[in-house]
């Protein structure tokens, strides 16, 4: 009996061997080798164009559904709502029931304030066939349900395994090759090899997300001896920028897999890692950064001054630390296209592994990157004013809202300084009103 099973077992082993060989060959020829040389076959662009056409088809179904809903619902005006609450019979004068309208609108304003909504996923104008962006649209029609089902099979059955393979390949090569480069003596050869290794590995990781990136104004790319600052939407912002140029990273020392990657990277390139006890020492951090930018042979530092991820709709307050050093600042604006996948990392809701799985099971990551002209501190300008000027330039270029609020409000309470500013503004309104009445 066992003799009959041997041919069957050998057939399975042969098929598995052939499948692995074909899979690895495709990865090597179409993804890894192009990533090494920085070339593209245009497959991702063609894929993106096909997705746009698919979204247009789904939008037609959604628009028909919305038209049916709009026939049965309309938004009442202030007068209509007040009359409805008064049940239509009251005289047009103040009534206690009028208060409920303003109370409700006040609560709506509190819920939909300009800060809180920056820490939730960006709203889409049309559905992108992802369940996580809307839980109801795929029930509108049979055809739309079929499209959604095929999309689930493609994303989880083909794209996710491919992307996970590429991610492990890119990270594995980064750890191994940077460790090898670290054995070379310091010099031009080591710097050259380090740049090539970092670029190659980051480009493989970019392909693990099916990222389609458009870089604008490359003549303004950051140069040695400066600091690159950018708005922050996602942890993959680092990979997005580092796949087009080499940077010295700044961050806290971690344990686990991230710690292994950090220790390997710093052997090949002078990245700046801080111990947990050092992070809050502003003078020590400023000195480490100043010493780095003073050496023009070292790579530009990459910093995200917001200190937290914002949902791709705005730029919030920049921390002033990186603007106190007195070196050239290279602003960069990053804007993602949410139709293909939501790049925002809500760290209070999702862990890193869960977030990466969301990214790898999305359709793609599509974004634009703008390199702005270098900026320096003007005479008489303090660090806060300089940070606000850079932030405003990034917001304008990326089409983002420029907000003064601190991104730390995601986890903390409003600072007393902000409360006092609002109280002063309100008191000015009251004083101004009383003065106007006294003059009249």
Image: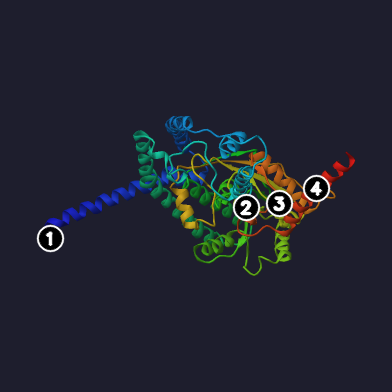
State yes or no: discs 1 and 3 in contact (Cβ < 8 Å): no
Q: Is residue 100 left or right of residue 175?
A: right
* Local crowd size for mark 2, using a 10 Å CA cut-off: few (<14), some (14–19), many (≥20): many
Q: Which residue is depicted at the point 64% across and 57% down?
A: 408
Q: Position of residue 134 (x, y in %)?
A: 45, 43
In the foreground, 374 or 9: 374
Tell me how far mark 2 sits from mark 3, CA to CA: 10 Å
Tell me how far mark 1 sits from mark 3, CA to CA: 70 Å
| Residue 125 shows in the view | yes
Residue 270, quarter of the rendered image: bottom right
Q: Residue furthest right?
A: 439
Frontmost of labels 3 and 4 is 4
Q: Which residue is depicted at the point 53% across and 43% down?
A: 38
User: Which residue is denoted by mark 3 in the rendering?
Assistant: 226
Nearer-N-terminus badge (1/3): 1
Q: Secondary structure at mark 2?
A: loop
User: Which residue is denoted by mark 2 in the rendering?
Assistant: 247
Q: Quadrant of the N terminus?
A: bottom left
Q: Residue furthest left?
A: 1
User: Which residue is denoted by mark 1 in the rendering?
Assistant: 2
Nearer-N-terminus badge (2/4): 2
Residue 420, quarter of the rendered image: bottom right
Q: Position of residue 72 (x, y in %)?
A: 46, 32
């Amino acid at each position: 009996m066992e003799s009959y099973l041997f041919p069957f077992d050998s057939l399975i082993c042969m098929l598995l061997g052939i499948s692995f060989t074909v899979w690895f060959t495709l990865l090597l020829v179409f993804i890894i080798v192009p990533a090494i040389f920085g070339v593209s076959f245009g497959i991702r662009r063609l894929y993106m164009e096909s997705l746009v056409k698919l979204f247009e088809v789904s939008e037609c179904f959604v628009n028909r559904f919305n038209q049916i809903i709009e026939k049965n619902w309309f938004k009442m005006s202030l007068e209509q709502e007040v009359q409805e609450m008064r049940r239509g019979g009251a005289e047009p004068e103040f009534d206690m029931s009028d208060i409920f309208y303003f109370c409700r609108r006040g609560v709506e304003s509190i819920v939909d304030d300009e800060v809180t909504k920056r820490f939730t996923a960006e709203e889409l104008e049309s559905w992108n066939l992802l369940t996580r962006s809307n839980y109801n649209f795929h029930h509108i029609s049979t055809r739309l349900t079929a499209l959604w089902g095929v999309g689930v099979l493609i994303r989880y059955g083909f794209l996710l395994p491919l992307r996970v393979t590429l991610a492990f390949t890119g990270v594995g090569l980064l750890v191994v090759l940077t460790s090898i480069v670290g054995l070379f003596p310091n010099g031009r050869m080591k710097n050259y090899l380090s740049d090539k290794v970092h670029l190659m590995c980051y480009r493989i990781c970019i392909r693990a997300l099916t990222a389609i990136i458009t870089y604008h104004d490359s003549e303004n790319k950051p140069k040695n001896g400066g600091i690159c600052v950018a708005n922050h939407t996602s942890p993959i912002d680092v990979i997005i920028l580092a796949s087009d140029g080499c940077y010295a990273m700044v961050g806290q020392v971690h344990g686990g897999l991230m710690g292994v990657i950090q220790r390997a990277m710093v052997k090949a390139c002078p990245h700046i890692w801080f111990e947990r006890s050092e992070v809050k020492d502003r003078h020590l951090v400023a000195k480490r950064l100043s010493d780095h930018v003073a050496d023009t042979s070292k790579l530009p530092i990459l910093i995200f001054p917001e200190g937290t991820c914002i949902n791709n709709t705005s730029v919030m307050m920049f921390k002033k630390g990186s603007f106190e050093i007195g070196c050239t600042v290279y602003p960069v604006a990053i804007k993602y296209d949410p139709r293909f996948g939501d790049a925002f990392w809500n760290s209070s809701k999702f862990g890193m592994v869960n977030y990466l799985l969301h990214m790898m099971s999305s359709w793609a990551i599509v974004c634009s990157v703008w390199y702005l002209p270098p900026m320096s501190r003007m005479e008489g300008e303090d660090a806060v004013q300089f940070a606000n000027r850079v932030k405003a330039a990034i917001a304008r270029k990326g089409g983002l809202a420029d907000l003064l609020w601190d991104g730390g409000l995601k986890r903390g309470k409003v600072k007393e300084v902000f409360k006092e500013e609002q109280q002063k503004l309100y008191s000015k309104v009251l004083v101004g009103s009383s003065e106007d009445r006294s003059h009249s």
